Image (cartoon, rainbow, N blue to C red):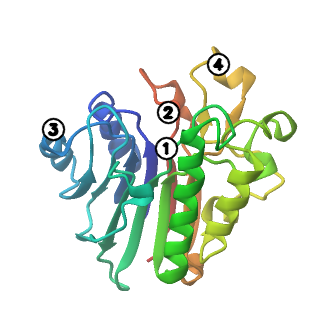
Amino acid sequence: MRLITWNINSLRLRLPHIETLTRTFSPDVICLQETKVTDELFPASAVREMGYTHLHYKGMKSYNGVAVLSRLPLTPLENLPDWYGQQDCRHAVVALELPGGPVTLHNFYVPAGGDIPDTTENPKFAHKLAFIEEVTAWFAQHPPSRSILTGDLNIAPLEHDVWSHKQLQNVVSHTPPETERLNKWLNGGFTDALRHFVPENEKLYTWWSYRNRDWKKSNRGRRLDHIWVTPDLTPALESMTVLRDARDWSSPSDHVPVMLDLKL
């Protein structure tokens, strides 16, 4: 199975890029974040014409939104918590039907957290930390198996997940309160699939700010996009690719797609 995760930063604006991904890489499943489209306006017909006949999406106008596009049969899993008491379309779950048995797929878009890393001064940062704590507690009560968790988790947890660990420790996305919580979530039943292939002492990024005029030259990136698998799926991991060239596509997202191949 070939899986791609991508914060597309507006599906309708970048729908042609899904065609490019499909034509070039033939993924079986694409998980999208920040679709920014209400369910009634989701371009389902256009996506199905690309071969993704099985869809599950949750969207809202102008903000957030997650979607799973699949060539494989899927069953949406509902009755999930409203994280932080908000129905803000940040989590979708499906059961994928595969020859070796079903696999549960979680697609998350974690809150960005604003600019100030202080829960008193910045309610968005408090929201982010509470969101991660609630999700971690939920997984502790519902131990995952044969599961994949993916999405824009908006945290670069390791030293070499950012261009400068020293300079970014007080910048939202790499602060200790965030990284500690994300690692606790990860260690509650998952393996970091990207770092399975790339050692922790090597730089690895999936996001480059729009503010960088020449993102390649400055290379001030962060690894905000993740794919985790439960230990029972770790033997199925075959390869991983960060599709950096997508950052140079016309009207690009500031995130690039991440592709994972598994033998399932």
- The circle on residue 246 is 2
Q: Earlier in the sequence, mark 3 or mark 4?
A: 3
As shown in the figure, which amino acid type bears the numbered disc 2?
Answer: Ala
As shown in the figure, which amino acid type bears the numbered disc 4?
Answer: Asn
* Label 1 CA crowd tier, 10 Å (few <14, some 14–19, many 20+): many
As shown in the figure, which amino acid type bears the numbered disc 3?
Answer: Leu
Marks 1/2 in contact by CB < 8 Å: the verdict is yes
The residue drawn where x is 31% and y is 68% is 94
Q: Earlier in the sequence, mark 1 or mark 2?
A: 2
Give the CA separation, mark 1 to mark 2: 7 Å
Marks 3/4 in contact by CB < 8 Å: the verdict is no
- The circle on residue 41 is 3
- Which residue lies under the disc numbered 4? 212
Which label sits in the foreground, 3 or 4?
A: 3
Could you tell me residue 222's position as x and y percent? 67, 39
Using the image, determine if residue 182 lies above or below residue 122.
Answer: below
Q: Is 35 on the left-hand or right-hand side of 6?
A: left
Could you tell me residue 102's position as x and y percent? 34, 81
SS at mark 3 in the image: helix
- Which residue lies under the disc numbered 1? 257
As shown in the figure, which amino acid type bears the numbered disc 1?
Answer: Pro
Using the image, determine if residue 107 lies above or below residue 49.
Answer: below
The residue drawn where x is 46% and y is 30% is 253
Is residue 1 visible to the viewer in this orientation of the structure? no
